[in-house]
Image (cartoon, rainbow, N blue to C red):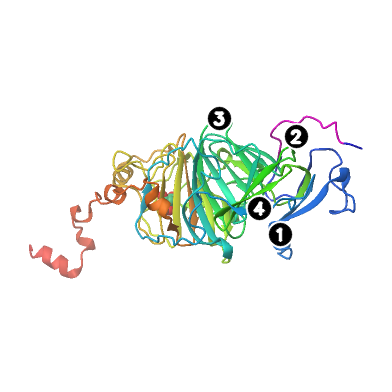
């Protein structure tokens, strides 16, 4: 029986839950019941399995989905290299530098769309070894061509929207990603990005290894931070107009390849499984912190984590700094000065980050800008923030109103690409000079307290020396 009476559905329909086994059909009866690959799937659809982990990976981390589609993805002409601006991941050497780095806001380029607009700024490891991460900036002004779709074979994209809206048509359904929302597009899933509200900008972390999971909650209990039900996967949706040929663009070891096919890739009528794209509104994060004293480690703000092979050590944590109440007593409330074996790449979606408030000098840490504090690179509040916070009256205070900073924290040493270091022309050369060199020693201003002097020094004081 020909399928003609499709019900009209809303453009964005979501299924709620993180890491769930979802099932969804855009046409009633399109999902086979009780079997994954029957001899003849319903409505003459083809069965295709999409594996996000090895067939044999343990159940708790196994990720796969079954797709029921008009034509299988294999039906395309060969891929050929296509000129793109994605650099470095094809083998260019990372610049590894111990200096603290900060970038001015990245400019929107109205002439480019998603694929041409991907700029690798920093990263570590190697996509061919399925090891490491890539950090990209996008700042684009155009829709992808109407009959173009993209996928990355290199890893999972975590997209952090900073400005504008992304309408992402994926094989598994549609996602609308607005500023202050994130989405994850797992390795291999094909999609097309258009911009319903004009130019769009944001940050991407690509995971060459593993997948994101929710952090363990330990003694926090069974809720808080990012709650499972607030992650949204798209319900199945497919193109009804099947008359167009498509170009499929693949990112494969950092290079862009293109292949033609005479049918739409957006033809999945039904799917089930736990390997799917999803989005999350950062405004739903249930922030917790100290209600007594001391500044807590920022891991308390982890939204998603991707573990390395060493449990508890992340190849990438995605951490946010949402608006929150600070109530700690007798505490220097901003982050402490520190050096970290992990590397910290930060971005600002909106507002002001409470550790970097001194924007009068050196460009400051601004929305759409970034910073990188690499392995053991010393950092902390800038001089202005230190002065203010060490003298502030410690009333309960709401920080970060209307603001959202984030951090990609990684156990890897993060290198910078040539684009990130020079070509983008956004590196602030006076970052360290303005932030920390003005800090003054206070130790020698203190009145010596006899009780704390060494015997020799006390004798010297008593002798009037
Ligand atoms: O460096 C930063 O601003 C990020 C950060 C925040 C915090 O609250 C504690 C440690 C830390 O690295
Ligand atoms: Fe830090």
Residue 85 lies, in percent from the top left, at 50, 49
- Identify the residue under disc 1: 62
Res 157 label: none
Tell which of 163 and 355 is nearer to you.
163
Label located before the other in sequence (4 or 3) = 4
Q: Say whether residue 251 is left or right of residue 400.
A: right
Tell which of 312 and 405 is nearer to you.
405
Cβ atoms at labels 2 and 1 below 8 Å apart = no
Please identify, in this view, whether the residue under mark 1 or under mark 3 is nearer the observer: 3
Q: Tell me if residue 343 can be seen.
A: yes
Residue 152 lies, in percent from the top left, at 61, 52
Helix, strand or loop for disc 1:
loop
- Identify the residue under disc 4: 188
For the residues marked 2 and 4, what is the alpha-carbon distance in whole angstroms?
23 Å
For the residues marked 2 and 3, what is the alpha-carbon distance in whole angstroms?
24 Å
Please identify, in this view, whether the residue under mark 4 or under mark 1 is nearer the observer: 4
Helix, strand or loop for disc 2:
loop
Q: Say whether residue 58 is left or right of residue 197.
A: right
Q: Say whether residue 253 is left or right of residue 334.
A: right
- Identify the residue under disc 2: 241
Label located before the other in sequence (2 or 3) = 3
Q: Tell me if residue 331 can be seen.
A: no
Residue 345 lies, in percent from the top left, at 45, 52
Q: Quadrant of the C terminus?
A: bottom left
Residue 343 lies, in percent from the top left, at 44, 58
For the residues marked 4 and 1, what is the alpha-carbon distance in whole angstroms?
16 Å
Provide the residue span drawn in magenta.
Answer: 3-14
Question: Which residue is painted at 53% across and 38% down in the image?
Answer: 180
């Amino acid at each position: 029986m020909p399928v003609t009476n499709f019900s009209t559905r809303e453009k964005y329909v979501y299924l709620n839950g993180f890491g769930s086994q979802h099932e969804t059909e855009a046409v009633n009866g399109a999902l086979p019941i009780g079997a994954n690959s029957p001899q003849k799937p319903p409505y003459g659809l083809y069965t295709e399995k999409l594996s996000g982990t090895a067939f044999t990976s343990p159940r708790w981390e196994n990720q796969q989905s079954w797709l029921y589609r008009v034509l299988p993805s294999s039906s395309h002409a060969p891929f050929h290299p296509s000129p793109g601006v994605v650099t470095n991941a094809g083998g260019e050497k990372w610049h590894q530098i111990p200096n603290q780095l900060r970038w001015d806001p990245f400019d929107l380029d109205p002439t480019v769309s998603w694929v041409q607009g991907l700029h690798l700024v920093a990263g570590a490891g190697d996509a061919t070894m399925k090891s490491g991460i890539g950090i990209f900036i996008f700042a684009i002004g155009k829709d992808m061509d109407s009959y173009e779709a993209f996928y990355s074979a290199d890893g999972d994209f975590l997209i952090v929207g900073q400005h504008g809206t992304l309408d992402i048509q994926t094989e598994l359904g549609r996602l609308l990603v607005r500023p202050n929302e994130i989405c994850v597009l797992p390795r291999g899933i094909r999609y097309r990005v258009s911009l319903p509200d004009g130019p769009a900008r944001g940050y991407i972390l690509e995971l060459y290894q593993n997948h994101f999971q929710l952090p363990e909650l330990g003694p926090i209990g069974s809720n808080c931070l990012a709650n499972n039900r607030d992650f949204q996967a798209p319900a199945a949706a497919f193109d009804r107009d099947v008359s167009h040929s498509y170009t499929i663009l693949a990112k494969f070891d950092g290079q862009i390849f293109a292949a033609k096919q005479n049918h739409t890739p957006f033809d999945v009528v039904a799917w089930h499984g736990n390997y799917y794209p999803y989005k999350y509104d950062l405004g739903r994060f249930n922030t917790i912190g100290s209600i007594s004293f001391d500044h807590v480690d920022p891991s308390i703000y982890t939204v998603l984590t991707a573990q390395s092979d060493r449990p508890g050590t992340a190849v990438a944590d995605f951490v946010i700094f949402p608006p929150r109440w600070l109530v700690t007593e007798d505490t220097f409330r901003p982050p402490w000065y520190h050096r970290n074996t992990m590397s910290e790449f930060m971005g600002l979606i909106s507002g002001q980050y409470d550790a970097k408030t001194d924007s009068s000098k050196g460009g400051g840490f601004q929305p759409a800008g970034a910073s990188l504090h690499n392995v053991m690179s010393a950092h902390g509040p800038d001089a202005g923030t230190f002065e203010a916070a060490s003298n502030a009256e410690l009333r309960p205070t709401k920080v970060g109103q209307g603001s959202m900073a984030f951090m990609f924290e990684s156990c890897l040493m993060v290198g910078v690409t040539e684009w990130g270091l020079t070509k983008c022309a956004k590196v602030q050369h006076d970052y360290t000079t303005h932030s920390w060199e003005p800090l003054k020693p206070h130790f020698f201003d203190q009145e010596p307290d006899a009780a704390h002097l060494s015997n020799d020094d006390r004798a010297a004081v008593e002798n009037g020396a």
